[in-house]
Image (cartoon, rainbow, N blue to C red):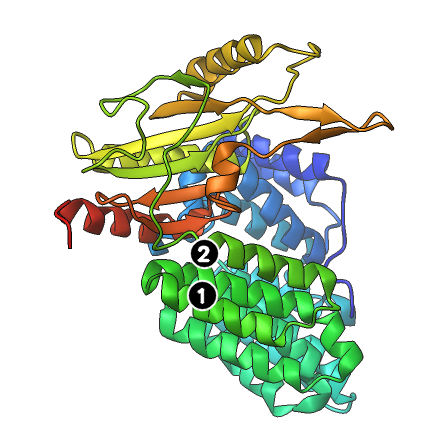
Amino acid sequence: MRSRIHTLPLAAFAFAGLALAALPSHAAAQQEQRQFSGYIPGRCAVASRVIDGINRHDRRDTTRFTPERDTLFSATTASIRTCEAAYGGATTEPTEVLNLARVQLLTAQDEAAIATARRHLGTTASRPAGERAWELYLVVSDNLAGKPARIDEARKALAELDALGKPAAGVRTVAHAMMAGAAIQRYDDATMRTETDAVIKAWKELDEEGRMWRAGVLANALVARANAEALASGGDAARAVIDTARGIVPPAAVQARALVDGAQRTLENIDKKGAQLEARFWYNVGPAGTALPAPGRVSLIVPIYRPCSGGCLSMMDGMRRITRQFANQDLDVTFRTRTYGFYLDTAPAAPLAEAQYDSAYFLGDVKPPGAIAIAETKYSWKPDGRRTNEPTTDDQNHPGAGVLLVDRKGIVRYAAGGWNSVFEARITELIGRLLAETAASP
């Protein structure tokens, strides 16, 4: 498969992005023109992602899909147009044609982007189906990665890819998995189910070696669907998807099968009585105290990490939105972690000293909107000097579940290995439904 883009040192892109924010528009345009001089479409495509990342710094709410925010920053778009002008907005290099189409998508030149991609595909008509399949896959992925995604154009290219049949089965497996992921992000459950079925169909057309090669794609698609089904339709629907996955993912595909088996353990927590959250140290406790999940209240229990960065910060923003939305209602949000026996360069650290360090860090810097529960990690040493951690009580009570949502009756209604910002709106909706329920026995 052809490399999708040409690379350039990130510092150049970062400088260009920072210039946009720091300089007057005329001076910025001059600076960009010099900075982008000699660029090609591939470099501009890379620059767009880096510059947009700089512009979105500390704007993590974009991890939750909302159509109106699924666009590039205006400053990013302006920089891409300047970059496009630096190379003249055209290219004669065959390896750069699809990069040109990407730049056109990013600057909302949809008709030009479609024409450019079609022109490129026209040059591949005589190639073997396997080679043409990868070109069609790139068109699918480019349209799905657009801001906003061009779903209709992606579908058209995917239909052409499917028409190539069995010789393109491996690529079709990947492309349909990508379409299923896009459907999950947009809460389009009907398309999610159709596309994951298409993943299975394409995967089954592969020979034994090909199935092993694409087993991870199959497993990831089915596990993602199971997690979505858990929120859309409940535990039984999610477990049915995992049962299907266990029936077709080969045991010899060790990593793929481990992913499926792990999801099965996590989803088994749903619809069961939630055990009391046990921790040795508690901080910032709310009205329910430390008896969580509390009878008559809804509990959302999520992991917290030291240091809290990346996905942890995205989760923290989500928790703040959720607690604001359900302020003064019967919802408890609890962040759980554990001791590790060290912090910074202090090792070994006594559990109390580590917990005090954690509480100062979390409450002082991260400011989670809920209680912090810190379990003590018991551990032992092997003869060869390796340390073995014992599972905490919560690990044993709820295996594989980093996230738990428990209803007023103490029943687990959602469980996941970790927080996924894509599901924030679904989880928020489920919390609303659970708060509307009564705590009366059935």
Does 367 sit above or below residue 265? above
Residue 374 visible in the displayed image: yes
Question: What residue type is disc 2 on?
Answer: Glu
Look at 17% across and 34% down and name the residue there: 329
Between 348 and 397, which is closer to the camera in this rendering?
Answer: 397
Q: Of all residues shown, which one is farthest toward the right?
A: 384
Q: Position of residue 346 (x, y in %)?
A: 69, 9
Q: Position of residue 325 (x, y in %)?
A: 22, 37
Between 42 and 276, which is closer to the camera in this rendering?
Answer: 276
Look at 50% across and 33% down and name the residue there: 393
Location of the C terminus (image quadrant)? bottom left
Residue 56 visible in the displayed image: no
- Quarter of the image holding residue 135? bottom right
Circles 1 and 2 in contact, beta carbons < 8 Å:
yes
Q: Which residue is mark 1?
A: 239
First in residue order: circle 1 vs circle 2: 1
Secondary structure beneath dot 2 equals loop
Question: What residue type is disc 1 on?
Answer: Arg
Q: Position of residue 409 (x, y in %)?
A: 22, 45
Between 48 and 249, which is closer to the camera in this rendering?
Answer: 249
C-alpha distance separating marks 1 and 2: 8 Å
Tag on residue 268?
2
Look at 78% across and 88% down and name the residue there: 127
